[in-house]
Image (tube, rainbow, N blue to C red):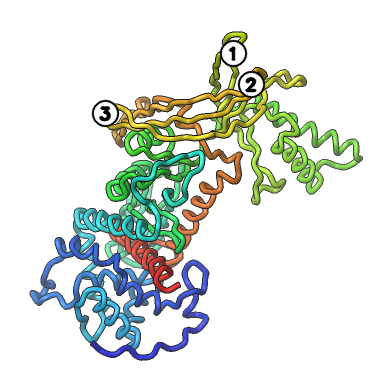
């Protein structure tokens, strides 16, 4: 092996990372990739599919694993051309050779792979879906092992969702990456002639047109491009990407596929999945019934406003108008924002009655400092026996949180009274291998507080893309909406907030590695590979933080 020269001191530009931090140089991260232990888990999958010889009949010049590492470097440098150019630096390639030898005991050639080498490798990997399927499975096996090594997803730990353990939380999200280019062929409605737009090519046949992209309107989003869906977990040393894929239709199908894949390798080490509105209803039931995993995320808002919703808005508007009039002020602009902030703060703190179906949350983005959510709600009854006979209490589940209710003497409407936090929430095994939960609450009563238990028995049905929509209703509409860490309780909900922030950060970090934040490949399977390679790169960064803090 060639001796490694002394590394030059990194400049401020070298230290700039795609996430905006300045902790590691690009060169250090590239070297770490070539020595990343997670690569070795991908070797067998690569060797099963990659041809032993190149198209000219000669023995492949570079190990598949080295070409994979080179391809992943593009997610550090921003493009494949930039990655192969960077590796031409003698001192950098020497360090990569040494790192790869320490990992595999395989000596790499004195010269790094060329752009043609990497393109041929990518072609071999992406031309058959089975190859990427196999590689993705191997990647998840490696990633869950890395997570476990760093203290997450340990097996054999019983969950209690009243106090969720972040080490057993995974989080997922999808992000739509814009098309490779805006080039497309449209047909003139008058002449029927095909017209090329969004490209400088003179002939449509030579234009680089992305032919595969999302179904317009899927998930109520009209954005063109491809949805990249990922599952991750947060460790002390940084996030670990657990699984990746792409989706051209509704996001929930790929989200559930990724969940199934992660559980195949992590087992009962996953307790909680944090996801946005793409995973709701029957999908939440499936996650619990099939895997014993509690989904935490947004509850869909009410589809239409009720009398309670209208009362809340009228109450807020009346307060603003009355106070402004008393103080001889005009209720607009800054005055309107301050008065709305005042009454919403009172409602949030419980100093004013809040109508059922209205939830108030502090917000850093809302002009008045609070977000008003017109939420869906469901009633239930808590019963217990007293010395005077049976006693019943009406409870309401509003935006995932459980409350007692009372009657507002002014509006004569039911309003939320006291929030009931969960004492404990554990999973229980059911017949047929399914799971459910048992959650305990302490309900106040004049005769003495009592413990009320809610048992959730979700259906394990895994619907498909072909399932009729009318058959996808959840078996228990109350159970899947019940949240033991509702948004109302900020300390407990922090695990959800942090996971959502991490998801958005990873989505941004991925897009920042792409040319102009567009798909780096013209083909869907090429973009799928790019997202997987981002996961390899990101996990390598986390491993580097662990081994070289």
Please say whether residue 522 is visible from this viewpoint: no
Residue 210: percent from left, percent from top: 33, 58
Q: Which mark is residue 377?
A: none
Residue at 22 percent of width and 74 percent of height: 104
Residue 528: percent from left, percent from top: 31, 57
Mark 1 neighbour class, 10 Å CA radius: few under 14, some 14 to 19, many 20 or more: few
Q: Nearer the viewer, residue 87 or 275?
A: 275
Residue highlighted by disc 2: 448
Q: Is residue 80 above or below residue 370?
A: below
Q: Which of the 4 image quadrants contains residue 374?
A: top right
Quarter containing the C terminus: bottom left
Q: Which mark is residue 432?
A: 3
Residue highlighted by disc 1: 386
Residue 70: percent from left, percent from top: 29, 73
Quarter containing the N terminus: bottom left
Residue 214: percent from left, percent from top: 37, 48
Question: Label 1 to label 3, Cα distance in Å?
Answer: 37 Å
């Amino acid at each position: 092996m060639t001796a490694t020269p002394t590394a030059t001191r990194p400049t401020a530009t070298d230290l700039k990372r795609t996430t905006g931090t300045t902790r590691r140089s690009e060169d250090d991260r590239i070297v770490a990739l070539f020595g990343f232990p997670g690569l070795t888990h991908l070797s067998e999958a690569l060797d099963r599919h990659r041809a032993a010889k190149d198209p000219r009949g000669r023995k492949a010049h570079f190990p598949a694993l080295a070409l994979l590492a080179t391809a992943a470097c593009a997610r550090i440098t921003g493009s494949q051309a930039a990655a192969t150019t960077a590796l031409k630096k003698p001192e950098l390639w020497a360090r990569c050779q040494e790192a790869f030898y320490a990992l595999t005991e395989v000596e790499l050639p004195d010269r790094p792979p060329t752009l043609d080498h990497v393109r041929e490798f990518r072609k071999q990997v992406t031309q058959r879906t089975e190859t990427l399927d196999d590689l993705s499975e191997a990647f998840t096996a490696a990633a869950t092992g890395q997570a476990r090594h760093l203290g997450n997803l340990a097996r054999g730990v019983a969950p209690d969702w009243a106090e969720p353990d972040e080490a057993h939380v995974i989080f997922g999200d999808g992000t739509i990456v814009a098309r490779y280019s805006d080039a497309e062929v449209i047909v003139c409605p008058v002449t029927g002639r095909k017209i090329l737009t969004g490209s400088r090519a003179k002939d449509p046949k030579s234009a680089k047109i992305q032919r595969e992209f999302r179904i317009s309107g899927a998930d109520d989003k009209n954005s063109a491009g491809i949805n990249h869906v990922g599952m991750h977990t947060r460790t002390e040393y940084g996030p670990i990407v657990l699984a990746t894929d792409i989706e051209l239709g509704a996001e929930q199908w790929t989200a559930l596929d990724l969940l199934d894949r992660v559980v195949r390798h992590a087992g009962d080490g996953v307790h909680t999945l944090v996801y946005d509105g793409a995973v709701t209803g029957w999908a939440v039931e499936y996650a619990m019934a099939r895997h014993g995993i509690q989904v935490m995320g947004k509850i869909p808002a009410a589809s239409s406003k009720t009398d309670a919703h209208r009362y809340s808005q009228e109450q807020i508007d009346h307060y603003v108008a009355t106070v402004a009039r008393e103080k001889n002020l005009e209720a607009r602009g800054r005055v309107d924002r301050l008065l709305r902030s005042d009454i919403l703060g009172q409602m949030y703190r419980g100093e004013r009655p809040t109508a059922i179906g209205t939830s108030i949350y502090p917000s850093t983005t809302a002009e008045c400092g609070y977000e008003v959510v017109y939420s869906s709600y469901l009633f239930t009854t808590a019963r217990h026996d007293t010395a005077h006979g049976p006693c019943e209490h009406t409870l309401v589940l509003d935006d995932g949180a459980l409350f007692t209710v009372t009657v507002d003497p002014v509006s004569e409407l039911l309003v939320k009274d006291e929030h009931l936090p969960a004492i404990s929430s554990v999973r229980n095994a059911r017949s047929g291998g399914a799971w459910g939960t048992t959650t305990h609450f302490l309900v106040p009563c004049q005769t003495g507080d009592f413990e009320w238990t809610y048992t959730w028995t979700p259906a394990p049905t895994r619907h498909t893309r072909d399932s009729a929509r009318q058959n996808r209703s959840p078996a228990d509409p109350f159970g899947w909406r019940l949240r033991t860490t509702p948004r109302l309780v900020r300390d407990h909900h922090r695990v959800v907030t942090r996971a959502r922030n991490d998801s958005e950060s990873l989505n941004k970090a991925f897009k920042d590695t792409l040319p102009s934040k567009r798909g780096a490949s013209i083909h869907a399977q090429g973009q799928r590979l790019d997202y997987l390679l981002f996961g390899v790169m990101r996990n390598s960064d986390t491993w580097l933080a662990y081994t070289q803090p």
